[in-house]
Image: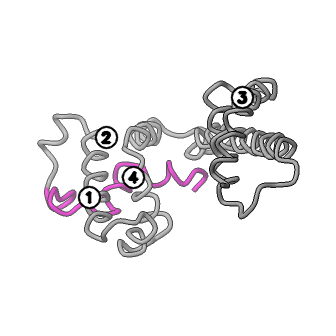
Amino acid sequence: MLEATLAGLYDTWAGKLLLYGRALGLSSAEAEDVLHDVFAAVLKLTHIPDEPERYLVRAFRNRSINHHRSWWRRVARELESHHWFDPAEPISPEESAAVECMNHLPVEQRETIVLKLWHQYTFEEIAVLQNVSANTAAGRYRYALQKLRSCLLKPSDRNEIDDEIFPRSRIGPDAIEFAGLSSACRGNS
């Protein structure tokens, strides 16, 4: 009974609510997402509201406002994230190169580097946070350091590196410090 009533409400109100969503400033896709969220929430109700049309319009409006708020928060976070590694004072060319290399890493590897070096998380703690195994977290760290080394060193320098100073098989925080990345990513430090 409830599903049949909701199906009838959907058939009657979907088009009207989509138009209302466009009037509220949503794109077609956003209005459809909000519409489906509203009806998914209505399906969880135990009974039909007394005035279902008013309920749907109100619920649609509230979810549209929440959608706009979350969109603006996401845009603000994305704009702010471009400045995460920007120091307050000018940086050296080496630090600039390190920051550029860091920006080219995949997000998971960049996150692992920051958590390991600057937050001093263990691989087990990183694994829990990222919902992966500790071996995967360690692998992300190792691969990220290899990519940073490759990005930061000239091809001629890579062949001349003494394995005692910069071991290829075991790369640690010293390698990042050596490349100038550590101070670049900490900003003022």
- Gap in Å between the C-alphas at discs 4 and 1? 12 Å
Crowd tier of the residue under label 2, counting other residues whose Cα lies within 10 Å: few below 14, some 14–19, many 20 or above: many
- Amino acid type at mark 4: Glu
Quarter of the N terminus within the rendering: bottom right
**Residue 18 location (% of width, % of height):** 71, 28
**Residue 170 location (% of width, % of height):** 19, 63
Do the residues under discs 2 and 4 have CB atoms within 8 angstroms?
Answer: no
Provide the residue designation for mark 4. Answer: 108
Of residues 141 and 99, the one nearer the viewer is 141
- Amino acid type at mark 1: Arg
Q: Nearer the viewer, mark 2 or mark 3?
A: 3
Do the residues under discs 4 and 1 have CB atoms within 8 angstroms?
Answer: no
Crowd tier of the residue under label 3, counting other residues whose Cα lies within 10 Å: few below 14, some 14–19, many 20 or above: many
- Gap in Å between the C-alphas at discs 2 and 4? 19 Å
- Part of the protein shown in magenta: 163-189
- Amino acid type at mark 2: Leu
- Amino acid type at mark 3: Leu
Provide the residue designation for mark 1. Answer: 142
